[in-house]
Amino acid sequence: MLPLEQILDEHGDAVFSFLLQLSRSEPDARDLFQDLWRRLVENPRLLAEARDPRAFLLHLARNQFIDLTRRRNARTRAHEASQAQPDIAGLFEPAHHPDEHAFREALDRALGQLPEDQRMVVHLKLWESLTFDAIATLLDLSPNTTPSRYRYGVDKLRTLLRPLYDEIRTP
């Protein structure tokens, strides 16, 4: 088993990014991230049998987010969390062109408009490069549900981003 410091170095950014996408709140993502690593420090055996540390950590992160959502009252449950619009542009590399910057901001807003279940699948597929089978296992979904949620999410992103794309592409 790798030392926790090495696991944090290798997978910490991916776990934090995933928590940020789920919670749509930087303070919540930071709290969940810190709690996850505290759990691992207190019980390092959690990772002992994991075949894929990143997938296992993302699974733990997802479970922590679900627990957080369940603890909140009805007003602040998952629907409102998915409507929040924190500035997560820092997750992307700096834009070198004004149109690129505008597109990244629009992408962030569009991701925030996806239902949480679609946003999770899209994030895991595009940013974590997981297979549909891995995503289905991670999110406890059937193998047929994962590609459908991805397709619906990407279709909605395409619809939401089409006006900006057309504007940028117009000479």
Image: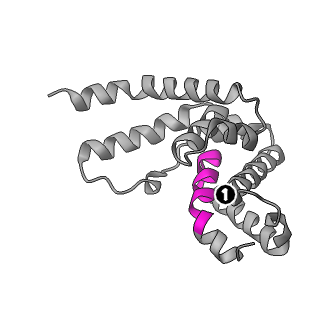
- Exactly how many numbered labels are in the figure? 1
Q: What span is colored magenta in the figure?
A: 10-26
Above or below: residue 30 compared with residue 104: below
Residue 165 vs residue 10, the one in the foreground: 10
Give x and y (percent) for residue 16: 61, 58
Q: Magenta stretch containing residue 133, yes or no?
A: no
Above or below: residue 125 compared with residue 166: below
- Image quarter hosting the C terminus: top left
Q: Please, what is the three-letter code of the amino acid marked with disc 1?
A: Arg
Give x and y (percent) for residue 24: 60, 47
Residue 170 vs residue 146, the one in the foreground: 146
Callout 1: helix, strand or loop?
helix
Mark 1, residue position: 54
Q: Which residue is drawn at the image coordinates 47% and 29% (left, top)?
A: 157
Q: Quadrant of residue 90?
A: bottom left
Answer yes or no: is residue 27 visible: yes
Q: Which residue is drawn at the image coordinates 56% and 25% (left, top)?
A: 151
